[in-house]
Image (cartoon, rainbow, N blue to C red):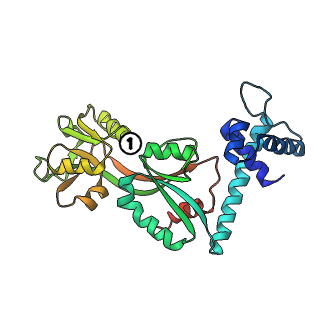
């Protein structure tokens, strides 16, 4: 039994299709089928049910699939450790990053990572957390950043940063002298928030619902800097991660803590569970433990 056979098998299960798996693996479908037949012969099992309408695993196939994930993950981990010890982590790392998060937090991480692993070709793809998730699921990128709480049974999740979401108001706003406010005090306030493309949009609505009201949303945008500029000009209030305000608008916007409910601002790193981390991705995943 060869590692490449297990990799082929896992990709077929993941894609639910021999044809799609062959395309992703850049091999012919006959070659892929031959590899799986060889694996079945060696293990003396049938891996897939012979149903032309749907590709599904036999009971033995389910067992082999779990085994293959464990073996491939172990191989990748140990290989990454070896290459790290030899100082030879190299290759391409495709990394998805929401724009505001990049400027506030990950810019420093990625700079220091580049110094430690100069042979890694780090490619940054910007997009909302929802877009980042879609790109990771579609194998367009290796790792991505999301704002928690985050749940997806197909993803690994590592929390890398914790802060809080704050009420951001202009220095002229009636609440600007407060240090803490209850969520219910925001019920009538004109609220400026990020668009539905962001996971954070849904989190804001969920917190308002928990506080017992529907927010008075007067403006939505995908541009964080526009939200902050409008807030600074007293055109409304917004909810945003404290580090974003303090780094970019400290002199023009007041940050006020929220309670009932509190609103944590937590950043997580995600990767696809069924896809073992390659050396560059594993090195960044582990590097985030060091910061």
Looking at the image, residue 144 lies above or below residue 107:
above
Which residue position is annotated with label 1? 198
The answer to whether residue 67 is left or right of residue 240 is right
Residue at the farthest bottom position: 86
Front residue of this view, candidates 143 and 208? 143
Q: Position of residue 159 (x, y in %)?
A: 47, 54
Total labels: the figure holds 1
**Nearest to the observer: residue 163 or residue 279:** 279
Q: Position of residue 83 (x, y in %)?
A: 66, 70
For disc 1, the neighbor class at 10 Å (few under 14, some 14 to 19, many from 20) is: many
Q: Quadrant of residue 40?
A: top right
The residue that appears at 14% across and 51% down in the rendered structure is: 176
Any part of residue 149 in sight: no
Q: Residue, x 73% and y 32% (percent of image)?
A: 56
- 70 displayed left or right of 30: left
125 sits to left or right of 6? left
- Residue for point 50% across, 45% down: 133
Q: Considering the numbered disc 1 on the image, is that residue within a helix, a strand or a loop?
A: loop
> Horizontal and vertical percent for residue 73?
68, 55
State left or right for residue 96 relative to residue 23: left
User: In percent of the image, x 57 and y 70: which residue is there?
Assistant: 119
Image coordinates of residue 213 in percent, x first then y, are 26, 31
Q: Is residue 86 above or below residue 190?
A: below
Q: Is residue 96 visible?
A: yes
């Amino acid at each position: 039994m060869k590692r490449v056979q297990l990799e082929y098998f896992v990709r077929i299960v993941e894609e639910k299709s021999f044809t799609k798996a062959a395309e992703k693996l850049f091999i012919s479908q006959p070659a892929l089928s031959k590899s799986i037949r060889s694996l079945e012969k060696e293990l003396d099992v049938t891996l897939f049910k012979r149903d032309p309408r749907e590709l599904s695993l036999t009971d033995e196939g389910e067992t082999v699939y779990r085994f293959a994930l464990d073996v491939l993950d172990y191989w990748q981990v140990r290989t990454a450790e070896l290459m790290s010890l030899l100082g030879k982590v190299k290759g391409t790392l495709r990394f998805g990053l929401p724009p505001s998060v990049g400027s506030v937090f990950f810019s420093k991480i990625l700079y220091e990572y580049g110094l430690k692993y100069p042979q890694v070709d780090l490619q940054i793809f910007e997009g909302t957390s929802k877009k980042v998730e879609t790109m990771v699921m579609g194998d367009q990128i290796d790792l991505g950043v999301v704002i928690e709480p985050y749940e997806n049974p197909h993803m690994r999740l590592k929390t890398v940063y914790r802060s809080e979401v704050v009420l951001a108001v202009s220095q002229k706003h009636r609440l600007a002298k407060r240090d803490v406010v209850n969520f219910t005090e925001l019920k009538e306030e004109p609220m400026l928030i990020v668009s539905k493309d962001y996971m954070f949009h849904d989190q804001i609505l969920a917190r308002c619902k928990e506080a017992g009201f529907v927010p008075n949303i007067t403006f939505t945008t995908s541009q964080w800097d526009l939200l902050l500029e409008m807030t600074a000009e007293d055109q409304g209030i917004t909810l945003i991660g404290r580090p974003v305000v303090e780094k970019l608008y400290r002199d023009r916007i007041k940050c006020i803590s929220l309670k009932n409910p509190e609103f944590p601002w937590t950043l997580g790193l995600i990767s696809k569970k069924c896809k073992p981390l390659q050396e560059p991705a594993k090195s960044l995943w582990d590097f985030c433990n060091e910061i």
